[in-house]
Image: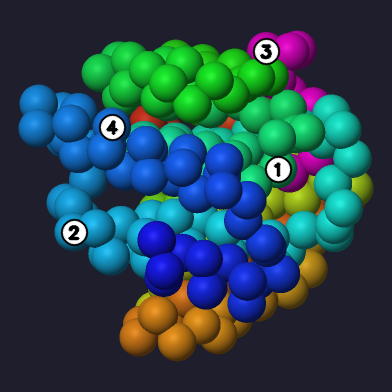
Amino acid sequence: MEHLIASSFQLGINLTHAQISNFHTYYEKLLEWNSFINLTAITDYNEVQVKHFIDSLTIVLALHEPLPAGFKIIDVGSGGGFPGIPLKIVFPQIDLVLLESTGKKVEFLKHIVQSLALERVKIVTGRAEEMAHLPDYREQFDVVVARGLAKMAVLAELTLPFCRIEGHLVAQKKGEIETELATSLKAITAMGGRLSMVKNIELSEFTDKRCLVVIEKVSPTPTEYPRRPGIPAKRPLF
């Protein structure tokens, strides 16, 4: 996995042999399950390294290392496990929750977590709009991560309620996001967030414009948010 090893080093990560082996197993299981579950359109060995594994690990650019034991991360809309599982492989000390609403994808997540013998990983089946109101999840996480889940205005409502005060949302975005970000500021503020930074990803493997939008949680999310399932996407808080 030359691409993964080299790019991880640029991100400040020195992968161990065991971690590289886990990523290889992850790739094999992803392809195996993708034959009967729609997990990804990207299946080429090198492309998976770049567009799934390395892309997931760019999250480290928004984290303050070293991460303490018990550092709590939730991956909202985890899908095939990105970015949550690559982060867990590299940072085994974190407590990780994978939130996914599609049952078949949940079964894959359970299988890959078991195959890689990952500990302190909880897989939750449900919608963010509902799970964020439960005491076990509401404002309980140091970092909330999301990749390709929704536009920022919708994403803020779906994710910031999980984030503790002084925690952060790290949203992975690509392309021109200036307008999207500008129209999301009302929603971010309403959820108790504040735009902290936009970190551009500068790795030669990526030819498109990628960035991390980092939102700090500065005040509690009002109890009425998130609204019931489907409403945040239908009526964003512009």
For the point 73% across and 27% down, the residue is: 95
> SS of the residue at dot 1?
loop
Q: Residues within 10 Å of mark 1 (few under 14, many from 20)?
A: some
* Chain-order first, disc 1 or disc 3: 1
User: Which image quarter: residue 53?
Assistant: bottom left
226 left or right of 21 in image: right
Q: Which residue is mark 4?
A: 29
Residue 193 within the segment the image draws in magenta = no
Which range is magenta? Answer: 132-143
Is 63 rendered above or below residue 73?
A: below
Residue 139 within the segment the image draws in magenta = yes
Name the kind of residue labelled 1 in the image.
Phe
Name the kind of residue labelled 4 in the image.
Lys
Is 163 rendered above or below residue 228?
A: below
User: Which image quarter: residue 221?
Assistant: top right
- Is residue 231 visible to us here? yes
> SS of the residue at dot 2?
loop
Spatial CA distance of label 4 from label 1 is: 21 Å
- Is residue 228 visible to us here? no
* Chain-order first, disc 3 or disc 2: 2
* Chain-order first, disc 4 or disc 3: 4
Return the x and y of residue 191 as percentages of the image width and height: 71, 45
Q: Which residue is mark 2?
A: 44
Q: Which residue is mark 1?
A: 91
Q: Residues within 10 Å of mark 3 (few under 14, many from 20)?
A: few
Return the x and y of residue 149 as percentages of the image width and height: 41, 47
Name the kind of residue labelled 2 in the image.
Asp
Spatial CA distance of label 3 from label 2 is: 39 Å
Q: Residues within 10 Å of mark 2 (few under 14, many from 20)?
A: few
* Chain-order first, disc 2 or disc 4: 4
For the point 27% across and 64% down, the residue is: 47
